[in-house]
Image: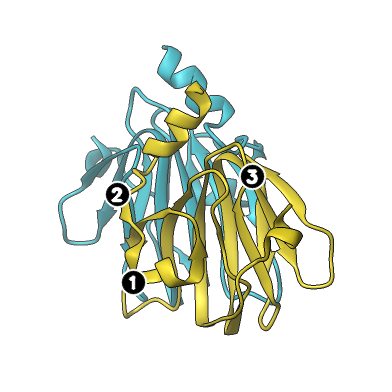
Chain colours: A yellow, B cyan
């Protein structure tokens, strides 16, 4: 599991602390290293690390967007009404304003992405095991 | 020079093509891999790679900002009137609206960063050897 150990500790940016602030919006354990939180810029940038099986709830970015830069491991991204996309290191995802979506690790791999986020998130229901499986 | 070979080819995102579009605003050779260029989001995201000694001209982001996420190698960042800062993997820089600055590789190392950029750039004079040295 050398691959997983590497992702767990952070590939370029360390994985940071347990993501307690958003834990209520995740299934499983995630970690957050906030890289940019500056009132003079309209995006926040964070390194988010998901343990195997961990994913965030369905959510929407209102009056904004989200860009994911995948930096390690293997995961999933899904927009409501579409097929889930398999993600690996080097993949880039852009989620437009108002699009309901979720992202997270695969069942057997840690997963890490840099998230560049603008706007206000609306957190919705968890991703059911039925959808995730 | 294993470190340099790795950075040259791209650590996570490939280094992309020679950065001909902006070559007039650089001293030395740089490479650009555009990751996000989407009319629906207010930032562009690109992976920029500098050969040793390469740096961009002094420039300003008007009505915007720039975030640099250093992903490999060793470089410099300087704001006008301040000391140059040494940069290495894992460093993060935020340049605010209207701030004159430059960035680039050290003399003996390749350098790579992800640039998240909003607003309109104004390109100014090259960084003189006197400043760079």
Which residue is found at the position 33% from the left and 79% from the top?
A40
Q: Nearer the viewer, residue B85 or A44?
A: A44
Q: Do labels 2 and 3 share a chain?
A: no
Q: For mark 2, what is the residue? A: B77
Residue B8 position, x and y percent, is 53, 26
Disc 1 chain ID: B
Whether residue B133 sits left or right of residue A64 in the image: it is left
> What separation in Å lies between label 3 and label 1 (alpha carbons)?
37 Å
Q: Is disc 2 on the same chain as disc 1?
A: yes
Furthest-top residue in this view: B1
Q: Quadrant of residue B59?
A: bottom left
Foreground of the two, B66 or A80:
A80
Which residue position is annotated with label 1? Answer: B96
Tell me the CA gap for discs 2 and 3: 38 Å
- Residue position marked by numbered label 3 in the rendering: A106
How packed is label 2: few (under 14 Cα within 10 Å), some, or many (20 or more)?
Answer: some
Given residues B57 and B114, the one toward you in this image is: B114
């Amino acid at each position: 599991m050398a691959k997983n150990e590497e992702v767990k500790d952070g590939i370029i940016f360390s994985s940071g602390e347990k993501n307690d602030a958003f834990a209520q919006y995740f299934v499983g354990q995630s970690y957050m290293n906030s890289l940019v939180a500056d009132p003079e810029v309209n995006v926040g940038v964070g390194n988010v690390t998901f343990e195997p099986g961990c994913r965030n709830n369905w959510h929407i970015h209102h009056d904004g967007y989200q860009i994911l830069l995948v930096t390690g491991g293997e995961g999933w991204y899904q927009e409501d009404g579409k097929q889930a996309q398999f993600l690996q290191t080097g993949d880039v995802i852009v989620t437009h304003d108002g699009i309901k979506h979720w992202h997270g690790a695969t069942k057997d791999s840690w997963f890490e992405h840099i998230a560049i986020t603008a706007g206000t998130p609306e957190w919705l229901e968890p991703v059911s095991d039925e959808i995730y499986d």
